[in-house]
Image: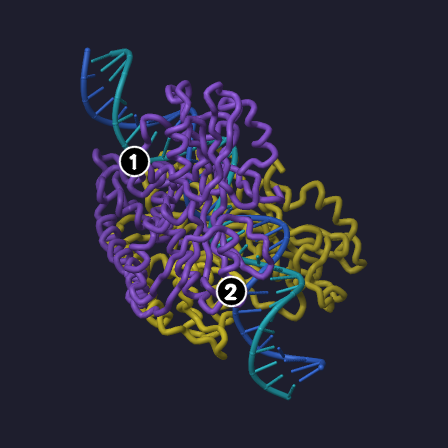
Chain colours: A purple, B yellow, C cyan, D blue
DNA sequence: AGAAGTCAATAACCTTTACCTATAGTCTTA
DNA sequence: TAAGACTATAGGTAAAGGTTATTGACTTCT
């Protein structure tokens, strides 16, 4: 069977006259591209490229095939356009609740493109902590929530959106000089392990962020809990110690001289971000559009669950 | 990724307004078609068909998508046409040797369409037995051979074409009445097993066909070897007994009242039909075109090796 | 000429896709 | 309300399509 992907590959080779470059532009490796083109050639029973030439050139019949392939691809690219033109008439309103540890970083990434794609949908966003968010859903104050899994409530329906790494923001001189940006919790402070194991933020249902601050003797510490990530960051920068910070917040932030972002060495903790709606949701269609839009517009690596270990679940 | 297959599926559903019928027309099962359409809908983020209606109808946006899909498919179907128009200029000549047990059945199936597709290629076909065929290749009397595997000659290069079932043509009253058309060799005659195991046609390098004829007391028999399948068939019809017959010969033949075609019950023996060329073959391009054409124009089930057990090899 | 470099093809392996059969669920119709 | 018609879902298998590592064929540069 001829596939559109194969056609994209021969177009890319025709454009760049180079298999490896074409593969790169198609975001695949060179063998993958070579094999697909070979398969296409075998299927059609003709040789499309003369590889003995340097750089590669299409054969006579290859030229014709490439020409037609460009037409096919051009036509197939019209499908999304057709759908976009329909989106203009999708009307509605969504009131959305979102975690304060997520909203400031996620919303700027998706709001603009979403309202552009769906100009007739109006959006109202509220920052809510997990409990408020679930209450808001039940009382129909909000139409949908965006929060961290798991949501232990059978009357609600969740839909996975992406997975966000939990990183560390560290202010301790010796680590700031490390070339490696990975660190184990042991290295930060052995005595912290007690708290980490008992009420470790990574073990709680919903990630509660906290800053762990050392006093001057470097051994005891106190913990500051808060909703505002920016407060935690400031505390760490001013007082020393470290805090857990979600990936998107770390990426959005310019690093300062006094502290730096690091990855946990032992394993890569991920929190799963989900969309929550009530089971009898009148706005299902709009919610699905939003979910799809989010998945398509966040950094692609956020969709890859297997790069780390999802935490926050009681059932692990 | 949108695939051309998915587009074919929605076109089929639009045409027949029925998932199961559409699936049948596409030569897949209904779940396969349903799932592919669902995947397409999810990918595009729109519902194409309103399945609550009876019969199913496209949604408003579905209509637009279907319309565009027809354009895409129409354009993609032009690719083979473009290639065909080039075939008119493929010139050459092929002298082909083919087994007498194969030629009369295979040639009529492919000759017409091949000469139509490649009007500038001239063909000369000779019926040759296996030994003559290999000699002919070495002496350049023929350009390529079509015979049964294995070809035990390192100076030659073989290319698999298809797999043909070895069936039975049986003339014995009690079996003619069976509703089941499967029969084990034991049922035919236990005493035949000796010969079957020693010089069983199914065990020989190249299938030698033979008719096993019973005399009137029904126990002893004699064996008639011959190149001509039609002679064997006539013998069985007139004298009783049975013969092995290749599938294509059985299919080409109208069954008579006195004998019938049956499948071997114990296992389904297949002979592999291959194309043979000398390693330094000047007509490689033409040979490949022919091989491709044969594969595309024989009954598709002949390509399925896994429906039986390939015999004829010494190395089994 | 021989060594190093460039580029596509091949090999071996792994993950995902697409298919199948069987079954369940949801409507219509008798 | 039982039966029939139709699509969706589940679970398993085989093929497709991806990866990295290696090979092989040509250039190009000492």
The relative height of residue B223 versus residue A236 in the rendered view (above or below) is below
Q: Which residue is mark 1?
A: A20
Taking depth in this image into account, of A94 and A213 the one nearest to the observer is A213
Chain hosting mark 1? A
Chain hosting mark 2? A
The relative height of residue A34 versus residue B126 in the rendered view (above or below) is above
Residue lying at 48% horizontally and 65% vertically, measured from the top left = A140
Asked whether the viewer can see residue B104, the reply is no
Q: Which mark is residue B167?
A: none
Residue lying at 38% horizontally and 44% vertically, measured from the top left = A300
Residue A210 percent coordinates (x, y):
48, 37
- In the current view of this chain or complex, which residue is farthest to the front? A216
Quarter occupied by the N terminus of chain A: bottom left
Q: Nearer the viewer, mark 2 or mark 1?
A: 2
Residue lying at 42% horizontally and 48% vertically, measured from the top left = A100
Asked whether the viewer can see residue B258, the reply is yes
Number of labelled discs?
2
Taking depth in this image into account, of A1 and A300 the one nearest to the observer is A300
Residue B92 percent coordinates (x, y):
28, 48
Residue A80 percent coordinates (x, y):
31, 60
Determine which quarter of the picture holds residue B48. bottom left
The relative height of residue A255 versus residue A28 in the rendered view (above or below) is above
Residue D15 percent coordinates (x, y):
50, 48
Taking depth in this image into account, of B136 and B163 the one nearest to the observer is B163
The relative height of residue A305 versus residue C7 in the rendered view (above or below) is below
Q: Residues within 10 Å of mark 2 (few under 14, many from 20)?
A: few
Q: Tell me the SS state at disc 2.
A: loop
Q: Which mark is residue A139?
A: 2
Taking depth in this image into account, of B269 and B244 the one nearest to the observer is B269
């Amino acid at each position: 069977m001829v596939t559109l992907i194969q056609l994209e590959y021969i177009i890319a080779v025709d454009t760049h006259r180079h298999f490896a470059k074409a593969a790169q532009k198609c975001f695949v490796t060179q063998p993958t591209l070579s094999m697909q083109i070979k398969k296409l050639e075998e299927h059609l029973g003709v040789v499309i490229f003369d590889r003995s030439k340097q750089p590669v050139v299409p054969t006579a019949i290859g030229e014709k095939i490439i020409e037609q392939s460009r037409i096919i691809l051009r036509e197939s690219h019209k499908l999304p356009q057709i759908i976009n033109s329909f989106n203009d008439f999708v009307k509605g309103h969504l009131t959305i609740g979102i975690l304060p540890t997520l909203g400031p970083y996620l919303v700027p990434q998706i709001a603009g493109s979403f309202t552009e794609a769906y100009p007739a949908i109006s959006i109202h966003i509220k920052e809510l902590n997990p409990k408020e968010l679930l209450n808001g859903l039940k009382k129909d104050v909000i139409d949908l929530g965006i929060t961290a899994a798991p949501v232990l409530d059978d009357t609600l329906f969740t839909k996975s959106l992406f997975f966000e790494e939990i990183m560390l923001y560290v202010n301790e001189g010796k680590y700031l000089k490390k070339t490696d940006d990975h660190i184990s919790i042991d290295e930060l402070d052995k005595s912290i392990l007690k708290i980490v194991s008992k009420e470790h933020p990574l073990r709680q249902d919903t990630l509660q962020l906290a800053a762990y601050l050392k006093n001057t003797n470097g051994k005891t510490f106190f913990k500051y809990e808060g909703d505002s990530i920016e407060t935690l960051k400031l505390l760490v920068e001013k007082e020393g110690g470290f805090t857990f910070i979600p990936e998107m917040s770390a990426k959005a932030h310019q690093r300062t001289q006094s502290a730096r972002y690091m990855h946990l060495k032992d394993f890569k903790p991920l929190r799963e971000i989900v969309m929550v709606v009530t089971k009898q949701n009148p706005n299902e269609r709009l919610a699905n559009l939003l979910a799809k839009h989010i998945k398509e517009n966040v950094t692609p690596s956020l969709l890859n669950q297997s790069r780390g270990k999802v935490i926050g679940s009681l059932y692990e």
